[in-house]
Image: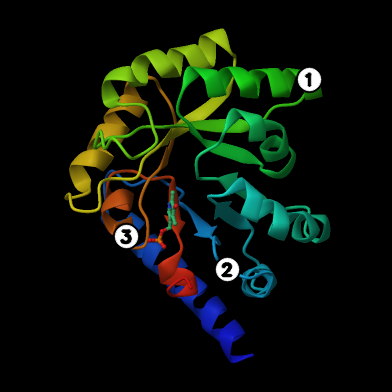
Amino acid sequence: MRIMQHLSERLHLLEHHIAEMRAQSPLASAHVTLVAVSKGQSQESIRHLLAAGHRDFGENRVQEALEKWPSLKAEFPDIRLRLIGPLQTNKVREAVDLFDAIDTVDRPKLAEALAHEFARRGDTRPCMIQINTGEEPQKAGASPAEADALIRVCRIEWNLSVTGLMCVPPVDDLPSPHFALLRKIAKRHSLPELSMGMSSDMEEAIRFGATHVRIGTALFGVRC
Ligand SMILES: *Cc1c(COP(=O)(O)O)cnc(C)c1O
């Protein structure tokens, strides 16, 4: 009971905070979705947020999500679950079965595999393209130099429903130049959505027009 109050309280505080940030920022999006990042969290914790009415969630591992989410989604059909971590082409079918949006399209091969899976099912999912704004070798995402070409391939060659761009700035950098860069690339392609900002940098992200902030720690507490 205490945990539950705790979680729903944090959710409401965060939503309030997001609304305040939006109101103060001229570039802010009219609507910012708080994506609750539930990786490493139990079904029980997730249920507390569901009970508080929250429906937007993100997971970064397909396998972990497959263990936690099918039963929850059967119970709450209006859940919107986003994949925010890397996707291997051999996991595309399972991912499309479970996730309502794929936010980490980062290479032509994956775009192709998704297109084939959507065609097979006669159904599609909104996708975001992940940009490695800091050009970190260990991080997923297309480099800024590859971004235009990848966005075109996804939209024109594979006819994916690309709604926006996603990024995770380097931990040691000031995040704002990365958010500004993501915004600039999205503008160039008239892409309306920007998934950027996590617990530590959501304020800057909202200031630069984030439409989705991905919040784990600030909501659930430190992951075990
Ligand atoms: C874990 C994760 C988050 C949430 O990070 P917090 O710092 O816990 O808010 C956001 N985005 C991605 C891609 C993640 O893997």
Label 3 or label 2, whichever comes before in sequence order: 3
> Is residue 204 found left or right of 139 in the rendered image?
left
Which residue is at 45% across, 13% downward?
152
- Disc 1 within 8 angstroms of ligand 1 (CB): no
User: Horizontal and vertical percent for residue 81?
Assistant: 63, 49
Chosen colour scheme? rainbow
> Is residue 122 found left or right of 84 in the rendered image?
right
Tell me where residue 57 sits by quadrant. bottom right
Q: Label 3 is placed on what type of residue? A: Met
- Res. 21 mark: 3
Label 2 or label 1, whichever comes before in sequence order: 2
Extreme residue in the bottom direction: 2
Which residue is at 42% across, 68% downward?
217
Label 3 or label 1, whichever comes before in sequence order: 3
Q: Label 1 is placed on what type of residue? A: Arg
Residue under pointer 2: 41
Of residues 203 and 201, which is closer to you in this image?
201
Residue 122 visible to the viewer: no
Label 2 and label 1: CA atoms lie apart by 33 Å
Q: Label 2 is placed on what type of residue? A: Gln
User: Horizontal and vertical percent for residue 48?
Assistant: 65, 75
Determine the secondary structure under disc 3.
Answer: helix
Residue under pointer 1: 120
User: Horizontal and vertical percent for residue 221?
Assistant: 44, 75
Label 3 and label 2: CA atoms lie apart by 27 Å
Label 3 and label 1: CA atoms lie apart by 42 Å
